[in-house]
Amino acid sequence: MTWLAGYVLVGLVLTLWLVRLWIRWHASGERASRPRELANAELVYMEKLFRIREPIRLVAKVDRVYRLPGGSLVLVELKTRGQDRPYLTDIIQLSAQRLAIEVQTGVVVEPYAFVSVLGRNRKMRSHQVRLLDAAAVVDLHRRREAILAMRASPVYARTESVCRGCALRLRCDRFTR
Amino acid sequence: MSKRRKRPGDEVSATQLAEMGFCEKRVQLAHIYGEQATPEQRKAMARGQVAHQWYLEEGLAATADRRCFVATFVFGPDARETQVLRAYRDTVLLRRDWGRVLVAAYYRVAPSVCRIMERLPATVVGARRMLRIVVTCCETALSKRRSP
């Protein structure tokens, strides 16, 4: 009898697992492209512009914003690239978007976000990233202002190999020295 | 190629700020000489624009057919009543702990309620009457918040 109950239980778990797999395979449209962690979230903003004047003058256009059942927002940014991974630029962009939304709407935006990378094979994978806090975004903005005003020395890209594709390479003193 | 130099202190976009994470020297050169792109970069940008358009259309299609929320189901997505309830959710409920719990619970229950109403159209009339009372209460609460 105990064995029979065990078999029934295992069968039930297996069936539920297969149903879950079937649903995931057959998910289509927006449901299929959203990160798995946002399965119960509501899509609230798409391609929406947010603009703030304080603490910095910033404009940010978000790709998608989801509202979690608890009310907080989560950002998702779409990227098309061959490398299936998020970059520091994605994290800065999403952190700036987070600051703009929080200041403009007053709604809490989660300190994590997703970078959905659409590869050349049309397959999309989402990567969760930790965002910078507001102070770090403001500091980065100040540094940018200082660099543009020639008050600070800019740092070059981490490796020279990434400079191969740069259109401003011929103007750069990293190569003309 | 835009040669207009932005003054420090001008509005910056999230994308422009993000470029600081790639190469600060490039940010400075683009500021001095204007933004420039190689043919490969232009192709990649075009590919990105197409992908973003598809991503947007997919999102719009999903939200247009969002019938799982009771007010949207009963009144329609753009009805005044639905907008009042949305405004109440955003400006009152989501700013309080108990409100967030209530919204979370509602999101769990609402799809099942919608499915029941879909099967039993007679229940929609009753739900509409009840929701109108709720909408009036929400409107009163919102107007009280707006008035100084």
Image (cartoon, coloured by chain):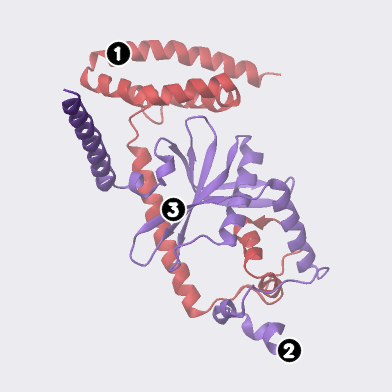
Q: CA distance from mark 1 to mark 2?
A: 78 Å
Give the residue number, with chain letter if any, for mark 3: A126
**What colour do you see for chain A?**
purple
Q: Looking at numbered disc 3 in the image, what kind of residue is underneath it?
A: Ser
Residue A171 drawn at (x, y percent): 67, 84
Dot 2 lies on which element? loop
**The disc label shown at residue A177, or none:** 2
Residue B125 is labelled as 1
Q: In the orientation shown, which residue stands out farthest toward the front?
A: A2
Residue visible at 37% across and 11% down? Answer: B129
Q: Nearer the viewer, mark 1 or mark 3?
A: 3
Q: Chain of mark 3?
A: A
Q: Quadrant of the N terminus of chain A?
A: top left
Q: Chain of mark 1?
A: B
Task: Give the amino acid at mark 1.
Answer: Val
Local crowd at mark 2 within 10 Å, few (<14), some, or many (≥20)?
Answer: few
* Image x and y of residue A128, in percent: 50, 50
Q: Secondary structure at mark 3?
A: strand
